[in-house]
Amino acid sequence: MSETAGSFRMLHTMIRVFDLDKSIDFYTRLLGMKLLRKTDYDSGRFTLAFVGYGDEAHNTVIELTHNWDQAEPYALGTAFGHIALGVPDIYGACEKLAAEGVTIPRPPGPMKHGSTVIAFIEDPDGYKIELIETK
């Protein structure tokens, strides 16, 4: 690895969202992230909102991009996999998320080929989020 690459760090992952308010509510209220900043770009007709569990100087965050003129929900395609979040009580978290109407296509339980307890949920746009139990 070069010296330059050794100083790299992950800053954010960007996903396009259809309903920005609904997405901000999902990531902040339901997943406990903070809205770190939100900026409208009138000349480009889009808004960027950054959410995460800590400040951008020390944490990787998610950039939610909302294109104002998007008429239909985005097609997710097959290349993107998922975002992963560590949670201390995966069963309790999934119970609360289900009560809020969050889609849980893979309920919590041990991985098929291991002992790690995981679950998959979907955000309002259908992006997959893997929950991994961290005790």
Image: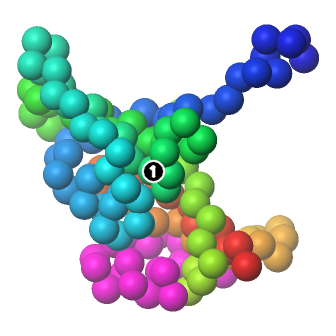
**Residue projecting furthest to the right:** 1
For residue 106, above or below residue 83: below
Residue at 54% x, 78% y: name it.
Answer: 107
* Image quarter of the N terminus: top right
Taking depth in this image into account, of 46 and 81 the one nearest to the observer is 46
Residue at 33% x, 61% y: name it.
Answer: 28
Residue at 35% x, 45% y: name it.
Answer: 36
Asked if the stretch drawn in magenta spans residue 55, the answer is no
Taking depth in this image into account, of 105 and 115 the one nearest to the observer is 115
* Residue 60 seen in this snapshot: yes
Q: Quadrant of residue 31?
A: bottom left
Image coords of residue 45 (percent x, y): 12, 20
Image coords of residue 29 (percent x, y): 31, 68
* Image quarter of the C terminus: bottom right
Amino acid at the residue labelled 1: Gly
Residue position for label 1: 52
Q: Which residues are magenta?
A: 92-109
Q: Quadrant of residue 39?
A: top left
* Residue 108 seen in this snapshot: no
